């Protein structure tokens, strides 16, 4: 169960609320979303973040837009507004384009109700997919636990936990399952500069769940792997290509390289909605570039000399050859087109 104050998005009695992740871990603030503009702002400003949660929030954004004006023009505006919020995660595109298709075939008077049914379904489906990812990832941790004394040492990057989803998390799902089963576990949490999702969010939610963890600077993972202090890495994904290449928060690639060099298994937790069935070329992935102030400043304090240029790439793509496997809601597969098609035979080539 997701503790109720940790629920990233709620929709009850017609009101949509999100947990404002920019205020965590110091303040737990629930923000009402009352309009399409509110939903788009929450995604753009990263009050909600993480590819699955962005998708679910966008779905509720469509609901809000259809409530205030269900016309064709309003549907088109909601679609483009939401698609423009963040470029890299594929869930947003799949949800918004899918909903546009469904709603454009409905009479305007039915659109708000239909959008709500779809948004509720997407939220529930996300939580149940994540639980299944947990079930399929658990044996990987169990196997390690059976071979060594002491806790299973997992390294994760960014936040692919409850807060990145509608609930339960993707990369954290096997960790939550292992903890539920009483498996000894310790998680190395990359701080994840520049937005510090690991330090602020992953640490907060693991702490709430009582899972032992330690926050490390982003550059520490390679050293820990050399010293045999990491048994496996599990990361999330914002877009996994049909080729098995994994796009995730910037810095993931470097962790995969270090894992490969040290023989540490490297897994990505991938819900079906995060698979881009059309992409095989890593260069085709739109990599979000954010404001340089996120790099230049830490907690509002400027770190770099005035006038120094900064670059702020949000994501990178880890080649499939560095990925031991993909943990999906349907099972674990090789990071390859064959592996993915084996689990999702219904997807057309
Ligand atoms: O920029 P963010 O915080 O939205 O990015 C989220 C991530 O990249 C996470 O690592 C995550 O793996 C993807 S969401 C499960």
Image: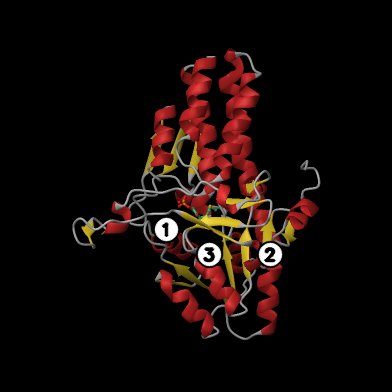
The secondary structure type at the circle numbered 2 is strand
Question: Where, by quadrant of the figure, is residue 347 drawn?
Answer: top right
Nearer to us in this view, 329 or 26: 329
- Say which label, 1 or 3, has the lower sequence index: 1
Pinpoint residue 131: horizontal percent, then vertical percent: 65, 54
- Say which label, 2 or 3, has the lower sequence index: 3
Which one is closest to the eye, mark 2 or mark 3?
3
Label 1 CB less than 8 angstroms from ligand 1: yes
Q: Residue lying at the far left in this picture: please name it.
A: 306
The secondary structure type at the circle numbered 1 is helix
Q: CA distance from mark 2 to mark 3?
A: 15 Å
In-image side of 172 versus 304 (left or right)? right
Q: Which residue is mark 2?
A: 325
Question: Where, by quadrant of the figure, is residue 172 drawn?
Answer: bottom right
Which one is closest to the eye, mark 1 or mark 2?
2
Q: CA distance from mark 1 to mark 2?
A: 24 Å
In-image side of 107 versus 303 (left or right)? right
Q: Which residue is mark 3?
A: 253
Pinpoint residue 84: horizontal percent, then vertical percent: 46, 35
At horizontal 40% and vertical 40% (from top left) the residue drawn is 44
The secondary structure type at the circle numbered 3 is helix
Q: Which mark is residue 197?
A: 1
At horizontal 40% and vertical 39% (from top left) the residue drawn is 42
Split into 4 quadrants, where in the image is the C terminus? top right
Characterize the local packing of mark 3: few (<14), some (14-19) or many (20 or more) Cα atoms within 10 angstroms: many
Characterize the local packing of mark 1: few (<14), some (14-19) or many (20 or more) Cα atoms within 10 angstroms: many
Characterize the local packing of mark 2: few (<14), some (14-19) or many (20 or more) Cα atoms within 10 angstroms: many
Q: Is residue 272 visible?
A: yes
């Amino acid at each position: 169960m997701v503790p109720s104050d940790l629920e990233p998005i709620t929709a009850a009695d017609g009101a949509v609320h999100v947990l404002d992740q920019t205020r965590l871990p110091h303040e737990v603030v629930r923000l009402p979303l009352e309009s399409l503009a509110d939903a788009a702002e929450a995604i753009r400003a990263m009050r909600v973040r993480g590819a699955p949660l962005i998708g679910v929030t966008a779905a509720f954004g469509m609901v809000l837009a259809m409530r205030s004006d269900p016309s064709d023009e309003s549907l088109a505006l909601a679609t483009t507004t939401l698609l423009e919020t963040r470029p890299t995660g594929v869930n947003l595109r799949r949800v918004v384009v899918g909903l546009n298709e469904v709603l454009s075939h409905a009479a305007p008077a039915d659109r708000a109700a239909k959008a709500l049914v779809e948004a509720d379904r997407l939220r529930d489906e996300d939580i149940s997919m994540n639980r299944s990812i947990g079930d399929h990832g658990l044996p990987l941790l169990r196997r390690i636990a059976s071979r060594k004394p002491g806790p299973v040492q997992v390294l994760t990057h960014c936040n692919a936990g409850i807060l990145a989803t509608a609930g339960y998390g993707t990369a954290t799902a096997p960790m939550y399952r292992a903890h539920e089963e009483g498996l000894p576990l310790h998680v190395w949490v990359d701080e994840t500069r520049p937005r510090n999702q690991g330090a602020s969010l992953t640490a907060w939610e693991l702490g709430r769940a009582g899972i032992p963890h330690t926050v490390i600077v982003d550059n520490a993972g390679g050293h820990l792997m050399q010293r045999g202090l990491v048994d496996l890495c599990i990361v999330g994904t914002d877009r996994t290509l049909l080729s098995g290449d994994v796009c995730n928060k910037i810095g993931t690639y470097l962790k995969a390289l270090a894992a490969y060099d040290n023989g540490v298994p490297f897994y990505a937790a991938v819900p079906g909605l995060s698979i881009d069935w059309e992409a095989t070329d890593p260069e085709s992935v739109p990599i979000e570039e954010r404001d340089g102030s996120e790099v230049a400043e830490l907690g509002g304090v400027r770190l770099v000399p005035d006038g120094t240029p900064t670059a702020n790439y949000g994501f990178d793509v880890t080649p499939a050859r560095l990925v031991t496997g993909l943990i999906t809601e349907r099972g674990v597969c090789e990071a390859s087109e064959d592996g993915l098609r084996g689990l999702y035979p219904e997807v057309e080539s």
